[in-house]
Amino acid sequence: MKHDRLAVVMGLSPTGLYAIRELGSMGVPVLGVTNGFSCGQFSKYLSQRKKFLTDNDHVHLLKILKDFAEEFSIKPILLPTSDYYIDFISRYSSQLKSHFVFQYSYLDGLSFQIMNKGSFHKLCVEHGISTPTVWEAETRGELRDVSKQVIYPCIIKPTLIHKARKFMKGKKVLLARTMSEFDNITSSIPSDIKGWLVQEVIPGPESNIFLFAGYFDRKGIPVHTFTARKLRQYPPGFGSASLVQSESNQEILDISTRFLQAINFRGLCGTEFKFDLRDNCFKIIEINPRPTLWFNISHSAGKRFVQTAYQDLTCQTLNPQEPQLDGVRWQYLLKDLYSKLFYMIKDKNFIFPAPEITKYSLSIKKRSWAVFDRLDPMPTIAEPFHFIKKFFERKIT
């Protein structure tokens, strides 16, 4: 099968690295787009050596992408791997669609609706999907007003995380165990950051979190699906996956596919649920309308999501779905070592118990990594420098 249409992977973190490797290993020419130092820019599968440096400037990026696309007689494929780039494509979709091909959810506004935590919660309520209880606030002042309504402990998070990335300093949420902590957090929030969500905390260990990956074709049919269990995350408690194990879960698959089809989603996505022991119910945490950090485990378990997206967007015949391999364990090594150590010496006041890890260790059949690949070693060498760079940037700011 011929794969000569250029794929432009936007974002070169380990998430983008997964996409680059899956496409590059099947012979697809790949160009990377980055707005800073990332491990993915060192992958041997980047067949186009030129890099786009955006400097967080959407207008500049739009111009150079459009100029670059003019060099091709066939439209390249755009594949964003972060919210920042989904925001970019969604905002400029009317201009980009004449130069590139990308999944439909970036054209119809659905991805932007999903990324916004407030509108996402409304979608869940509308379609009967169980969620944690939430309270919305547009400004810092409105946050102060809801402090007496919420149930503690709770978490505070921006409705658009990438808009508050500098303030959050690597955190996905801010934890308030008491009203006093809530008020202290509220006082520290810059007045120019608008849109906040306060959400109840679902008790229980991180190992009660379940994941779904899916690709929905142009007709909205889920042609490839995958489920897994999150075992640990970084930062501990409220972060991104650092340890995941593939595990078939029919209920998570059914809820995810039913919801995504109900909202007419088409394209690549991942969902996250946590099992609430209080009412024995899976409650949805988020949907990412793109590949996410842990997607490489699906590749190791026999799934090819980015390959399927490329085939669908280039109007090729899709490969038939194969059963997933359960018992594949994926690890983001440097981050997971920190989280593992945290739970060994954690403060007794930390609100979550240690995740259950050993009970799933007996079923491990295969190992998978966020960055390491013996056939593509340079990203592994570069990744520690990325951590050092981010550490000093956060210390300075």
Image (cartoon, rainbow, N blue to C red):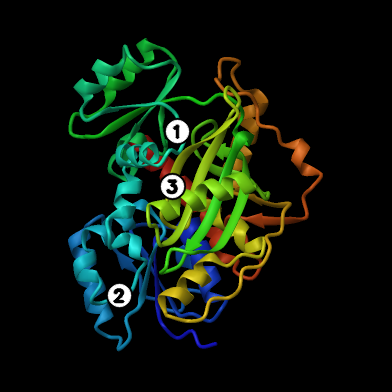
Type of amino acid at the residue the image marks with label 3: Ile
Q: Answer left or right for 256 relative to 178.
A: right
Would residue 397 be seen by someone viewing this image from the given angle? Answer: no
Question: 10 Å neighbourhood of mark 2: few (<14), some, or many (≥20)?
Answer: some
The picture places residue 22, in percent across and down from the top left corner, at 55, 70
The spot of residue 218 in percent (x, y) is 41, 69
Depth check, front residue: 274 or 174:
274
Q: Residues within 10 Å of mark 1 (few under 14, many from 20)?
A: many
First reached walking from the N terminus: tag 3 or tag 1: 1
The residue carrying mark 1 is 131
Disc ID at residue 287: 3
Whether residue 72 is situated above or below residue 44 in the rendered picture: below
Return the residue nearer the eye: 389 or 143: 143
Residue under label 2: 100
State if disc 1 and disc 2 touch (CB < 8 Å): no
* Residue displayed at 33% across by 58% down: 35
